[in-house]
């Protein structure tokens, strides 16, 4: 790489879990690198999402970075599933521990990025008008970092406080004595609702479609437990590397049909009582791929909901009827169903009584007018491509990435897209990292990218671009990875749906569903075949 022509070899956008690690690795190999971040500190998802109840549903010790034995040895998680404040502390600790803060520029929002074909350089325009120039542009902009508000009339007319969960005020919100509305019942709302219910005078939950939720079973970790975990880190990460989703929980491959009803129920009961994602990802393979096996398990979970919710009319509303367990992302919960047994909590089914408009004082449904002090929109995200669309990214021939991906993303390995040389889309669409325990997935993607940058340096290459054939083949392969699952048309953000955005009312192939081990093998084989499918100059 020519050291003279640009200010930077690499500019990274985003100081979340992925950007922090990319910065660490890029500095390690001696690149001139800077990282720009919109927030005023590192943390990404864990910096922004400060709503009460926000926490991992990965076991904490399977979520931390695996790259440094010293870091693993010195950090003590205090909960099995760490809360947002603890995770934010962890990420700040990593940044300071490896002296990364000085490589980060905070409060700097990227507005546009343009590839200059004459100089083969990326020009990055910041919202403050400043411009950076770099050979490589690396996006680490998150998969769920473009929040979407509902399309409801009168949104701006509400006189009380209102915000999306992603923008939960940093200074906190005093919920005591307040009448609160939460719109949405996805994983975020499922964490938030029990916490608000404990404090608010009254909570009204507006639900369009229920999700299949299952208990998290969080608990504290003491120093002795952490000492044991530290002994086992190698095995923990090796196990995560073997499972399709990068979690500790991998599918049970026993023959479903050869088991008795009692054997299945005992197994499911055990999963239900155990911490974490076992109820979903540790289930029988057939439950995950076959509608009738899935229906059996869904009924098992429905019975749990009926047991936990006292009013059976409410229980019925909380049981999904339009999709099976695990065909959308499963929210893990702590006392979610019990929250609906409280006198101060009411569930409004929007299928029966849709919201007509937001009023100055509250919400008008087709049936009645509600008064609120606070409205919380837990209405999800423009997932995975949304954070790209918010930056005006122009590649060769001034073509925008937004235009290129308008009918769905096209990528090679989810890491590059043709026409945008030297742009690496870490945690981008069609990579495996977006469908896995995130840190495990991004470590693969970052390590692979660093290996490529080293390869280019050794061979004196200046830029790299995915070939058309390779991109078409990968995009088709990602599509096939969806078709292996019966739930690929279920309306969820995994499948690219978002009712609050135009053009998001059909399947968009955003995630590589072939599994993390297959993905890792594939990208490493391509690397060892001199980066087959990439064109270097
Ligand atoms: P989400 O799963 O997309 O849920 C959004 C909710 O808002 C859904 O219930 C949706 O209803 C509802 N909604 C959207 N627009 C609406 C409208 N116009 N009117 C009424 N309801 C509307 O978003 P999320 O809950 O923020 O979760 C997104 C993802 O973030 C999760 O799947 C997970 O991957 C991640 N997350 C992770 C954690 C964790 O690690 N523990 C915690 C929270 C979130 P419909 O279902 O009918 O569309």
Image (cartoon, rainbow, N blue to C red):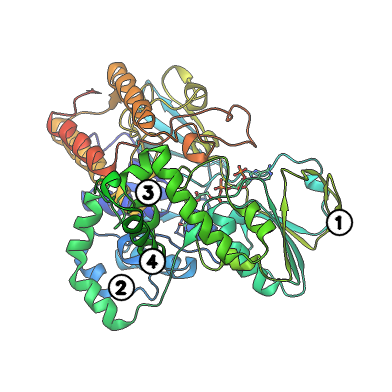
Q: Point out residue 263 in the picture as x, y percentages from the top left corner.
A: 31, 58
> Which numbered disc, 1 or 3, marks the residue that appears first in the sequence?
3
Relative vertical location of residue 446 with respect to residue 415 in this rendering, above or below? below
> Which numbered disc, 3 or 4, marks the residue that appears first in the sequence?
3
- Residue assigned mark 4: 275
- Mark 3 in CB contact with mark 4 (< 8 angstroms): no
Separation of marks 2 and 4 at Cα, in angstroms: 22 Å
Q: Nearer the viewer, residue 177 or 424?
A: 177
Q: Residues within 10 Å of mark 1 (few under 14, many from 20)?
A: some
Q: Residues within 10 Å of mark 4 (few under 14, many from 20)?
A: many
Image quadrant where residue 375 sits = bottom right
Q: Residues within 10 Å of mark 2 (few under 14, many from 20)?
A: some
Identify the residue at horizontal 33%, vertical 19% (top origin).
472
Q: Secondary structure at mark 2?
A: loop
Q: Point out residue 143 in the picture as x, y percentages from the top left corner.
A: 46, 44
Q: Which mark is residue 75?
A: 2
* Residue 106 shows in this picture: no
- Residue assigned mark 3: 34
Q: On the picture, is 474 further left or further right than 311?
A: left
């Amino acid at each position: 790489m020519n050291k003279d022509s640009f200010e930077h070899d690499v500019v990274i956008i985003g100081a979340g879990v992925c950007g922090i690690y990319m910065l660490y690795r890029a500095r390690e190999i001696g690149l001139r690198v800077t990282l720009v971040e919109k927030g005023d500190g590192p943390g990404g998802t864990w910096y922004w999402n400060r709503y009460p109840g926000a926490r991992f549903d990965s076991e904490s010790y399977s979520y931390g970075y695996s790259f440094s034995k010293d870091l693993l040895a010195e950090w003590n998680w205090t909960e099995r599933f760490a809360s947002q404040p603890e995770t934010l502390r962890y990420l700040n600790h990593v940044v300071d521990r490896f002296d990364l803060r000085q490589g980060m520029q905070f409060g700097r929002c990227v507005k546009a990025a343009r590839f200059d074909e004459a100089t083969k350089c990326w020009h990055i325009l910041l919202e403050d008008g400043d411009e950076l120039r770099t050979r490589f542009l690396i996006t680490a902009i998150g998969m769920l970092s473009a929040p979407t508000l509902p399309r409801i009339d009168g949104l701006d007319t509400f006189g009380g406080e209102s915000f999306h969960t992603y923008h939960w005020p940093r200074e906190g919100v005093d919920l005591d004595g307040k009448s609160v509305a939460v719109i949405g019942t996805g994983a975020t709302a499922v964490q938030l609702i029990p916490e608000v219910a404990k404090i608010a005078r009254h909570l009204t939950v507006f639900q369009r479609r229920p999700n299949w939720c299952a208990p998290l079973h969080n608990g504290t970790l003491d120093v002795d437990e952490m000492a044991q975990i530290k002994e086992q880190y190698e095995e923990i990460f090796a196990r995560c590397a073997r499972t399709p989703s990068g979690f500790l929980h991998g599918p049970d491959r026993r023959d479903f049909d050869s088991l008795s009803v009692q054997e299945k129920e005992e197994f499911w009961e055990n999963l239900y009582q155990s911490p974490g994602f076992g109820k979903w990802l540790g289930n029988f393979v057939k439950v995950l791929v076959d509608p009738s096996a899935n229906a059996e398990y869904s009924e098992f979970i429905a019975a749990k909901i009926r047991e936990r919710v006292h009013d059976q009319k409410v229980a019925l509303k909380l049981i999904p009827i339009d999709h099976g367990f695990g065909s959308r992302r499963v929210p893990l919960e702590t006392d979610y169903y019990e929250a609906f047994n409280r006198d101060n909590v009411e569930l409004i089914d929007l299928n029966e009584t849709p919201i007509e408009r937001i009023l100055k004082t509250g919400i008008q449904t087709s049936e009645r007018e509600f008064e609120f002090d606070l409205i919380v929109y837990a209405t999800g995200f423009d997932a995975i491509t949304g954070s790209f669309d918010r930056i005006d990214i122009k590649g060769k021939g001034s073509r925008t990435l937004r235009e290129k991906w308008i009918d769905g993303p096209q990528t090679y390995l989810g890491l590059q897209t043709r026409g945008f040389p030297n742009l690496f889309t870490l945690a981008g669409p069609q990579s495996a990292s977006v469908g896995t325990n995130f840190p495990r997935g991004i470590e693969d993607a970052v390590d692979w990218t660093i290996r490529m940058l080293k390869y280019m340096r050794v061979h004196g290459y200046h830029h790299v671009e995915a070939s058309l054939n390779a991109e078409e083949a990968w995009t088709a392969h990602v599509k096939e990875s969806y078709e292996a699952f019966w739930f690929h048309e279920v309306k969820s953000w995994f499948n690219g749906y978002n009712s609050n955005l135009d053009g998001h009312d059909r399947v968009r192939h955003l995630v590589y569903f072939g599994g993390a081990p297959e993905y890792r093998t594939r990208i490493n084989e391509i690397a060892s075949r001199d980066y087959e499918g990439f064109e270097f100059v």
